[in-house]
Image (cartoon, rainbow, N blue to C red):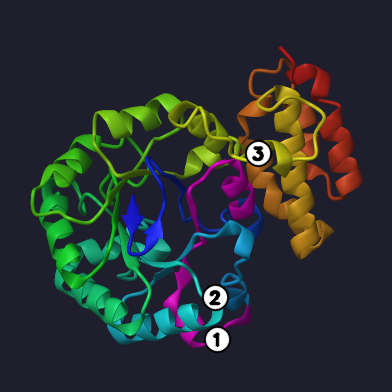
């Protein structure tokens, strides 16, 4: 699959843009695990145009993680165009993505993200402004519609394609659903089957296994699949998926992790989590790095099902030094083995 001049190979699986999750360390780890492309945290165009330092830091990318996309959001076409030029000028991403799908109140409630599903003319004006502002491929991510009574994705995909975007990611829920219920991939398939659609369609929503990923390609016909929340505390999901979709092709995950254990064993996965902690601490310091990684430690399936584990889990989530955290993590090693 290609987006502009970016070749992502056959059946590519992508890491979704997620705030406070897809920082540079996590993106790089997921790339090494087999993600074909990774996306930044979504970035506010208003903060970019005001040159807010904490926002500008989100633009940092490294060569090892390419191809990489940076996602921006906002509701003003001229501000979005200016922000797009700042991103391209400072970060030089391979792809610029527009967020038309974030459902959270502080974004959609202010008319940006999925809020633009209630103002399609403005959404299209923003898309055109961003496409015309930069010289790299522009893509977009959106949802089926505002609610069940206003599912507009089939027509919307055509309209967005006509603005010049070069790929469209569709999350199979409406804005009103937020993240409840099941993602409806039938609408994603119907959009892909529309003979007017020439750009790649990327499917997103509830993908948490290699089997579901294969189904997305085989039964729903998507050009690519995007994985989001299922990667929390589980960056190795990309290796799981890659080993099924491309069994003869090595991801390089073995070289990415300093571990004496076989890949995909519980011991190796524990070492992956420790490497994630290490990267976070090296990037932003011990205290903030550990705080940042707690979401992954709380969500990881690695510790699920261990009897009487609650107190130990709480202790891990309260640890504030890397030595204490690693000691607590090492104490789980015999518990996670089958």
* Mark earlier in primary sequence (3, 1): 1
The residue lying furthest to the front in this view is 248
Query: Is residue 29 part of the magenta span, yes or no?
Result: yes
Q: Which residue is drawn at 13% across and 59% down?
A: 158
* Mark earlier in primary sequence (2, 3): 2
For the residue labelled by badge 1, is the local secondary structure a helix, a strand or a loop? loop
Place of residue 333 in the rendered image (x, y in percent of width and height, measured from the top left):
81, 24
Query: Quadrant of residue 184 in the image?
Result: top left
Q: What residue sits right under mark 2 in the picture? A: 91
Q: Select label 3 or label 1 by which is in front.
A: 3
Q: What residue sits right under mark 3 in the picture? A: 253
Place of residue 72 in the rendered image (x, y in percent of width and height, measured from the top left):
42, 70
Give the CA distance from mark 2 to mark 3. 26 Å
Q: Is residue 283 above or below residue 218?
A: below
Can I make out residue 139 in this image? yes
**Which of the two residues, 256 or 313, is positioned nearer the viewer here?**
256
Tell whether 292 sits left or right of 318. left
Q: Give the range drawn in magenta.
A: 27-53
Label 1 crowd bin: few (<14), some (14–19), many (20+), radius 10 Å: few
For the residue labelled by badge 2, is the local secondary structure a helix, a strand or a loop? helix
Label 2 crowd bin: few (<14), some (14–19), many (20+), radius 10 Å: some
Q: Residue 289 carries which label?
A: none
Query: Quadrant of residue 160 in the image?
Result: bottom left
Q: Which mark is residue 51?
A: 1
Tell whether 60 sits left or right of 273. left
Place of residue 290 in the rendered image (x, y in percent of width and height, measured from the top left):
76, 52
**Mark 3–mark 1 CB contact (< 8 Å):** no
Query: Is residue 40 part of the magenta span, yes or no?
Result: yes
**Which of the two residues, 244 or 203, is positioned nearer the viewer here?**
244
Give the CA distance from mark 1 to mark 2. 14 Å
Label 3 crowd bin: few (<14), some (14–19), many (20+), radius 10 Å: many
Q: Is residue 1 above or below residue 311?
A: below
């Amino acid at each position: 699959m290609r987006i502009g001049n970016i070749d992502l190979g056959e059946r590519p699986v992508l890491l979704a843009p997620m705030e406070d999750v897809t920082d540079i360390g996590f993106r790089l780890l997921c790339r090494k695990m087999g993600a074909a492309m990774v996306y930044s945290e979504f970035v506010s165009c208003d903060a970019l145009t005001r040159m807010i330092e904490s926002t500008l830091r989100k633009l940092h990318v490294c060569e090892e993680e390419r191809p990489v996309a940076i996602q921006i959001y906002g509701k003003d076409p001229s501000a979005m165009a200016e922000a797009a030029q700042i991103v391209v000028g400072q970060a030089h991403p391979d792809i610029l993505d527009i967020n038309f799908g974030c459902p959270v109140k502080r974004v959609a409630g202010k008319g940006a993200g999925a809020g633009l599903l209630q103002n399609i003319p403005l959404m299209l004006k923003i898309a055109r402004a961003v496409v015309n502002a930069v010289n790299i491929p522009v893509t977009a991510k959106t949802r089926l519609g505002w609610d069940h009574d206003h599912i507009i994705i089939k027509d919307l995909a055509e309209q967005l394609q006509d603005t010049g975007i070069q790929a469209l990611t569709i999350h199979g829920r409406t804005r009103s659903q937020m993240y409840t219920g099941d993602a409806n991939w039938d609408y994603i398939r119907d959009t892909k089957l529309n003979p007017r659609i020439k750009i790649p369609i990327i499917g997103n929503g509830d993908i948490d296994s290699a089997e579901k990923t294969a189904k997305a390609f085989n039964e729903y016909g998507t050009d690519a699949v995007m994985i989001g929340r299922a990667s929390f505390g589980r960056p190795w999901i990309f290796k799981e998926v890659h080993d099924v979709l491309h069994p003869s092709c090595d991801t390089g995950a073995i070289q990415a992790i300093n571990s004496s254990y076989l890949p995909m064993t519980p011991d190796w996965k524990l070492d992956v989590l420790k490497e994630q902690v290490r990267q976070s601490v090296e990037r932003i310091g011990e205290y903030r790095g550990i705080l940042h990684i707690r979401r992954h430690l709380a969500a990881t399936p690695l510790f699920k099902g261990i009897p009487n584990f609650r107190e130990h889990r709480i202790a891990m989530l309260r640890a504030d030094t890397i030595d204490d955290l690693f000691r607590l993590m090492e104490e789980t090693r015999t518990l996670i083995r089958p």
